[in-house]
Image (cartoon, grey):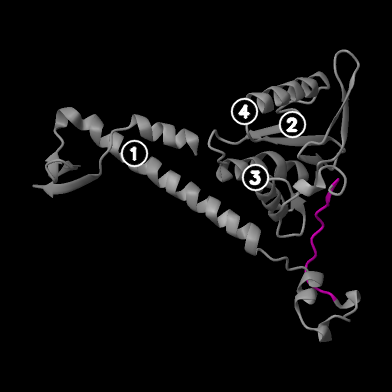
Amino acid sequence: MKTYKDILKKLPEGRLCYKVVNGRVRYYTWDKERKRQVYIKKKDADLVYQLKYRRIVEEAVRTIEQNLKAQEKLIVNYQEYDPQSCQMRLGKVYQDMPEKFYHMPRKSVLVEGCQNNYRSEDLIQTSSFGMKFRTKSEALIAELLHSAGIPFTYEAKLVLVDEFGEKHYYKPDFTFILPDGRRIIWEHLGRMDLPEYRQKNFKKLAIYHYNNIYPPKNMIITMESKDGGIDVDAIQYIINNQLLPLFQK
């Protein structure tokens, strides 16, 4: 999102329109001060493309914002559709149905995590599948992983050593165990604009690297923008193109 908004700052403002005169296209832009359309001369042809590009980028920003709202609604309103979840939402008469009669597709997504020991009071975001997370961004990523059917563990304990042999205990946001036994971790970094938070995470990344954990080998790193935004399309791209193929081999 931030990248698109930075691009908009560099592009000229204005809306583009055109007329066909004698079979030729003539482009105009709206002059706010004079409140009328102004013809764009051939020598200023680059302005036409800049205004077209601006409109495309504005549409991208609008779509991203719309996607974010849709994902936030999904987190709040999404309901599981497995037999047990459907059964629990119905009346008492449906509660005694033996499992052997279930014929609906069943998900096999592994969702685990250390959720009841470490700072459990901070687990304030609840996903559609009943799992709690510390931030909306983590919950959003988890929703997308769950929708893709990718098994993950949330905040699995990881013990590493630094170059001096000192032990460090970490809980990566998401851990994935591939079918071939390899492990991949995903760290989503939030307030990198805060010096203390940034320094802490740079140190952690250095220790990860010392233990041969780094992208793209076995680690995924995503960050929020300075204003706290998260690029849903980018997250979805990582899941579809970087993670999902590893589980389909």
Going from N to C along the chain, the mark reached first, 1 or 4, is 1
- Image coordinates for residue 43, horizontal then vertical, percent: 16, 27
Please say whether residue 44 is visible from this viewpoint: yes
Q: What label does residue 216 carry, if any?
A: none
Element on which disc 1 rests? helix
- Whether residue 106 appears in magenta in the rendering, the answer is yes
Q: Main secondary structure of the magenta part?
A: loop
Distance from Cα at disc 3 to Cα at disc 1: 28 Å
Q: Residues within 10 Å of mark 3 (few under 14, many from 20)?
A: many
Q: Residues within 10 Å of mark 1 (few under 14, many from 20)?
A: many
Q: What label does residue 219 carry, if any?
A: 2
Q: What label does residue 194 carry, if any?
A: 4
Q: Amino acid at mark 2?
A: Met
Q: Which residues are magenta?
A: 102-114
Q: Residues within 10 Å of mark 2 (few under 14, many from 20)?
A: some
Going from N to C along the chain, the mark reached first, 2 or 4, is 4
Disc 3 versus disc 1: nearer the observer: 3
Q: Amino acid at mark 4?
A: Leu
